[in-house]
Each structure stands twice: as structure tokens, then as C-alpha cells.
Amino acid sequence: MTDSVRATHAPAQETAAATATATAPLISLEGIEVVYQIRKGFFRTGQVHALNDVSLEVAKGETVALVGESGSGKSTLGRVSLRLIAPARGRVVFDGQDITAAPEESLGWLRRRAQIVFQDPFSSLNPYFRVYDLIEEPLIIDGVPAEERRQRVYRALEAVDLVPAPRFASKYPTMMSGGQRQRVGIARALVRDPDYIVADEPVSMIDASSRVEILNLLRTIQTERGVSFLYITHDIASARTFADRIAVMYLGTIVEIGSAAQVIDRPLHPYTRALINAIPEPDPRNRFRHREVVPGEPPTSGAFPRGCPFFSRCPDRIPGLCDIDRPMLQEVEPGHFVACHRVTDNVASG
Amino acid sequence: MTAPAPLLAVEDLHLHYVSGGRVVRAVDGVSFTIERRGEAVGIVGESGSGKTSLAVALMRLLPKNVVRFDGSIRLEGQDIRALSEDEFRREIRWRRIAMVFQGAMNVLNPVLKIGDQIAEPLQLDGRLSKQAIRSRVNELLVRVGLSPEFATRYPHELSGGQKQRVVLAMALVLDPDVLILDEPTSALDVSVQAQIMNLLKDLKQDPGISMIFITHDIGLASDLCDHIAVAYAGWHAEYGPAERVLLEPRHPYARLLLASLPRLRATTPPQPMPGEPPDLTNPPAGCRFHPRCPYRFAPCDTDVPPPIPIGDGGHARCWLNDPGVAGDLYLAHLKEPAGVSHD
């Protein structure tokens, strides 16, 4: 990795929350609800609620991290923002245009302006395609002339530091390391010059030593090109490194959202606190103490609970209130929102 | 009077495979020690560093394409590597050394009740009565934090964390001294992972199980392990007490790995590791890390560094730790800020 990438790493955390609301959002999700139909046996079907009344905005040039565990709905929300999933309720607005119910045939422009980087760089790249062909393919669909295609493929490879570009262009994905393959995945997203990229766990399947490179690369792309990112991850520590704002999701809802510093240094939702407490950072003293944990596991299917989604595991729950009345997000400091009935107590206790 | 032999002492262990006509040196001269019951050693490494092969060698679950398997594995002084396959199977595997495989929770038999799956080795053993087996199963379930009612449930009725507890109970059924855990929490969410790590801490204390904890996550290793080995390309680049390895790593790879981790409360951003992981079928000459090492000097690209002892019983395979070779460069890398904050 070059020094230029290192130098551009600029945590924009405190300021970004303020600027996020100042400019018009690129993506606006309002009251999104998603329900999946599943089979529960040969004849019966059931419903799984994936998202329950979720609202989120991503400003131009902003990176928002969606942090949560499996089943929290973070990937579903990312796909709704790309209109790969149509929500049952709510509105999806991209750069001022309502795309909630737009027919797929009319979304060609969105497919160019919004891209996704997948989690698995081993299965998301066709092993029979050379790197060149993998990156060129979207441009063929866009009807870009051949000579321009070649230039843009090489430019995309250079942008992700796969240089010399012609050497990497002729390789097959299987000849490359996980980190290099993920760069190909990013180049493929970049080649259409998008305004918005959903990065769905882009580093969870690559080796620890290559992760920072990839995150720094995404950060560079964001600062140099002003691309907006939705960074989906289960790793709240990497969200701090890479994102301006962090939204913590649990069971289909956003339970806390704020600047990266607000959420990590002053977490106010019991689930956010549990998530942060659960992370083992390298420290030889760790082994002498038990970790504070929340009991149980998130329910995997079924309807949303009536009250707070975290009620069944919450150490601070108030029976008779939290299980009946769903807490809404409230602003506790500028840009920092928490959905918890205890929030005033927690603000007081710091 | 001599000191009692350590519980487990692995010395200069090699396990090489042949794959596609080339030799893969998956374990290539690895040494570590578990002094006493209840100690845990962490093997931290990236994919292809040979950490799972080490487990395979200790359990002697060798594939057919092994071309070299030597070195010593002493269990309370007895070299179990020299045992015949028959002796090893009767006396050691599962009885003294047991293992939880990566992803084991996903291969529980879906049509057998949990209790029957845990009891199977005891039934085959034939020494205990039905009654005694049932109470042993119940005891194990309680030990891993489940209630005895789980014995009559089927795997599909369990959550991920509960299945991982069952898999642990299965490994403990014959009361082993050493438990090898290969990425035991990699399929679990962090909040559930923390619960399992707390359980493993309990099992270290009571009944005092020693553990070999294999992981790609050095932070997770610090949550359990008294000693840590940092694996790189079939070597243990660095090995020693957790305090030393985490706070004053002597091998540049360990140092760079720690500096590359995103931290929750770090003041400096994580630093990327230079270069690409090595190809195990064709590892670099000399020090296997030298193509990526910012501290390399004259001998590194030609001379293989031995495990150079460090006063605390650990070692580092890096010439910078040998004053005779490194001269003025001796421990030069320690003089630079590590990018590792303690708090």
C-alpha cells in the first residue's frame, strides 16, 4: 500500500454528523418495512419481519456504517437502498427521485449510479473470467465504446492499486489473494463512476493483515471522488476507522445512531454498550476477567415484539413499559439519536 | 528432585503434505509448551499459516498425502508422537487430547437427540451403565451452561450459541486434559461469542482443562490465552507469554499485525501491513516474512532464522533478536513506536 493512501486517512468523525444534515441527502429511506415470506413446512408459509419502520439518510460524500449482528436487517436495508428489494412500506428516495415503486426497466440510471461490493471475494467473481472481463462487463452493458472501455478498466485497476494494471487485468481471480480479489470487486463497482456504494461486509472474509488496506482504499475513494458509502459490518471497531456516522441495528430497527465518536465513546443504548463490551481488543489482562455479556441470543424469526426489540435480553428493562411501548429514536445531543426508555437515566449516568 | 514434566511439550514439529506435486510445509519446526493444567496457548494466524494443520498433527488425524511428520509431542513426559496408531487411538485421541473442529456446530446429527450424541463415546466404551451415562450427560450439559432438559432436544431446536455449547460438551465427554479449539466462535455473533469465551474461561479454572486455541483474531486469543504463538507460513514467528507477545512483540510480523487492527479507542489509525501473504508451496528463501518486512537486513533473504530464545521461555524467528548477527540493529524495531496502545 502506498503512502498516499495512508496520508489521506482522515477521521472526519465529529464534524460529519453536523454536515450530514446540512446538505441534501443522496439517499433517503423513510419508514422502511420489509417482510419476507418463508416456508414453514410443505404447505404452511410464515412471515419474517426483516425491517420495522427504519429511516436513514446518507449525505453526499458521507459514509454511514450499519452495525449489527446476523439477522439485524442491516444487509436488507442496504439492498432496499439500492432497490434490489422493494419495501412493503416506506419511501426510498435517491438524489431527489422517489424510486420506491419504480419499475425495474426504468432504473437503468440507478444501476449505473449505485453499486455494491459483496462480502465474499471468492464466490462473487466468476472464476472463468479474467479480471479485465470482470471489470469491463458493466461497461458493455452501458454501451461504452471499446477504446473507452479499455481506458476505464485500467483506470479502475489503478484506482484500487492493482498496478501495473495490464498485468493484473490478464489474471484470473483464482490467481489472486483475498485482498486482491476484493480490490477487483471494488474496481468493478468503481468503473461505472458511481455516486453511491453499498459495501456489504467487504473485509470480513479477508485476512486481518489485508483489511486495513481495503478500508483505507474505500476511504480514499470516498474522499477523492465524493462517493457516498453505506458500510455494512458486524465489526464496530472497523466502523470507527472508516465511517462518519454509525447506525446500530437490532432486530430490524435502528436502536442508536450518531457520529462514530458519539456512538463509540458515549453509547447510550444497552445493546450498543453490550456490543462494545463484547469486543476483545488485544490486551493481556482480558483473560483474567469475565466479559459483561447480555444473556440469550436474538430471536431468529417471527413477528416483531410489540415493545422494544431488545426487551428479552436487556439488563435495564422496565417491565410493564419496555415490553408494551416501543421506544422511538430521540435526539439526546446534536446528531445522536437513541431508542430507549431508559435513555434519560443513561445520559445522566454517562 | 526434578520438576514434573510439563503437561504438553511440542518440540520442532513438522507436518508436510504433498499437493499437486509440490510440498506444502504447513507445520515447519514448531515448538510450544503448556506447563500445567488450566493453561491455554493461542495459535494466531491468517489463512494458510498452518494453524489448523498443527491441530491435525496433534490429534494425529493425518490425511494420506503426508510426506513428513516428525518432532516430539510429549504429554506429561511421554512422547505420544512415537506411539503406534493403535495405541494413540486407544489412549490419547479424545481421552487425553480432544478437539472442537471449526464449524462443528453445523454438523451435529439432525436426527439424533442431543443427549444421545453426547453419550455416544460412552456407550461405545461400554464401561458405564445406562444410568451412569445419563447422569454424566446431564453433568456435562450443566457444565457448559445448558439445562439437563437439552438432552432430549434435537439440534434444530437450538440456537447457534447453544449448539456450540453442545459441541463443547461432546469434546469433554471423556474428560480430556487438553482441548484443541479451532475457531470455536467464528460462526457466532459477537455478543454470543463473548458468552462462549466466558464459558471457556470457566472450564480453564474448573475442571482445569488446558486449551490450544486456534484463531485468526489476536484480540480473541488475548481473551483466553496465557501464551500466544503468532503463526506465519508454517512457522511460529513469535511465541511467548501473552503479556510479552501483545505488548512487546519481538517479531516484526507480530508487531505489524497488532498495528493493523482497527481499535475502538485508538488515537492513531490502523497501519496497513505491506505485501501479500506467502505461497506455502513456494515460501520465500531465508526468513519467510522478509519480502514484507520493513526491518529486513543482510541475512534475511538468504539465512533461515532459527527460533531465537527470549528470556521468558518464548522465542522469535527474526534475526533482529540475535545480537551476534544484528549488531547495531539488535532489537532496532523495538525502538520505534509500535502503534500499539495499551488502553
Image (cartoon, coloured by chain):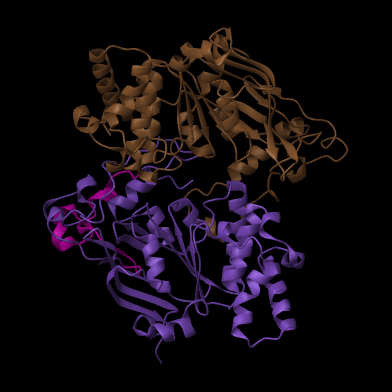
Chain colours: A brown, B purple
**Residue B223, percent across and down?**
52, 56
Query: At 59% from the left edge and 72% from the top edge, which residue is drawn?
Result: B172
Vertical placement of A242 versus B306: above or below? above
Look at the image and tell me whether residue A256 can be seen. Answer: yes
Vertical placement of A86 versus A288: above or below? above
In the figure, residue A194 lies in which quadrant?
A: top left
| Residue lying furthest bottom | B1
In the figure, residue A226 lies in which quadrant?
A: top left
Vertical placement of B16 versus A47: above or below? below
Look at the image and tell me whether residue B33 can be seen. Answer: no
**Residue B100, percent across and down?**
52, 65
Foreground residue among A314 and A206? A206
Query: At 63% from the left edge and 53% from the top edge, which residue is drawn?
Result: B160
Q: Which residues are magenta?
A: B311-338
Foreground residue among A280 and B83? B83
Query: Quick check: A30 left or right of B62?
Result: right
In the figure, residue A34 lies in which quadrant?
A: top right
Q: Is residue B327 magenta?
A: yes
**Residue A69, percent across and down?**
60, 40
Quadrant location of the N terminus of chain B in the rendered image: bottom left
Query: At 52% from the left edge and 32% from the top edge, which residue is drawn?
Result: A232
Foreground residue among B103 and B256? B103
Q: Is residue B343 magenta?
A: no
| Residue lying furthest front | A43
Vertical placement of A39 versus A253: above or below? below
